[in-house]
Amino acid sequence: NLFSEEVMVVCETDKSVELPEEIACLGIWKEKIYGISKVTVYVR
């Protein structure tokens, strides 16, 4: 098992990029736009 029980992955992209709702066993917890960037936080 690559991840521990609690895991958080933070992705920074251009605000126009649409990331998937789920990646492997992780789901989007929060998304926030900062200027031209978007931060997406995935959690298990």
Image (cartoon, rainbow, N blue to C red):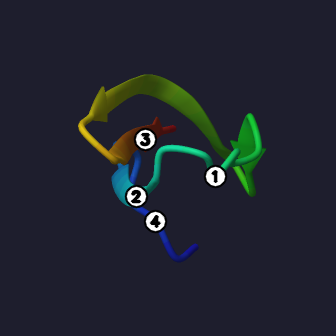
Q: Amino acid at mark 1?
A: Val
Tell me what residue is drawn at x 48 percent, y 44 percent: 15
Of residues 2 and 20, the one drawn nearer to the viewer in this rendering: 20
Give residue 5's mark: none
Q: Residue at x 63, y 52 (%)?
A: 17
Residue at mark 2 = 11
Camera-side residue of 22 and 3: 22
Furthest residue in direction front, as rendered: 36
- Mark 2 or 4: the one toward you: 2
Q: Please state which amino acid type lies under the numbered disc 2.
A: Cys
Number of other residues with Cα within 10 Å of mark 2, as a class: few under 14, some 14 to 19, many 20 or more: few
Q: Residue at x 51, y 38 (%)?
A: 44
Q: Position of residue 7 (x, y in %)?
A: 36, 50
Callout 4 secondary element: loop
Q: Earlier in the sequence, mark 3 or mark 4?
A: 4
* Few, some or many residues within 10 Å of mark 4 (<14, 14–19, 20+): few
Residue 10 position in % (x across, y down): 33, 54
What is the C-alpha distance between the residues marked 2 and 4? 17 Å
Label count reads 4
Going by the numbered disc 3, the residue's amino acid type is Thr
What is the distance, in whole Å, between disc 1 and disc 2 at their CAs? Answer: 11 Å
Residue tagged 1: 17
Left or right: residue 12 compared with residue 44: left
View extreme (bottom): residue: 2
Residue drawn at 70 percent across, 45 percent down: 18
Numbered disc in front, either 3 or 1: 1
Labels 3 and 2: the sequence-earlier one: 2
Image depth: mark 1 or mark 4 in front? 1
Q: Nearer the viewer, residue 18 or 23?
A: 18
Question: Distance from label 3 to label 1 (Cα)?
Answer: 10 Å
User: Which label was assigned to residue 40?
Assistant: 3
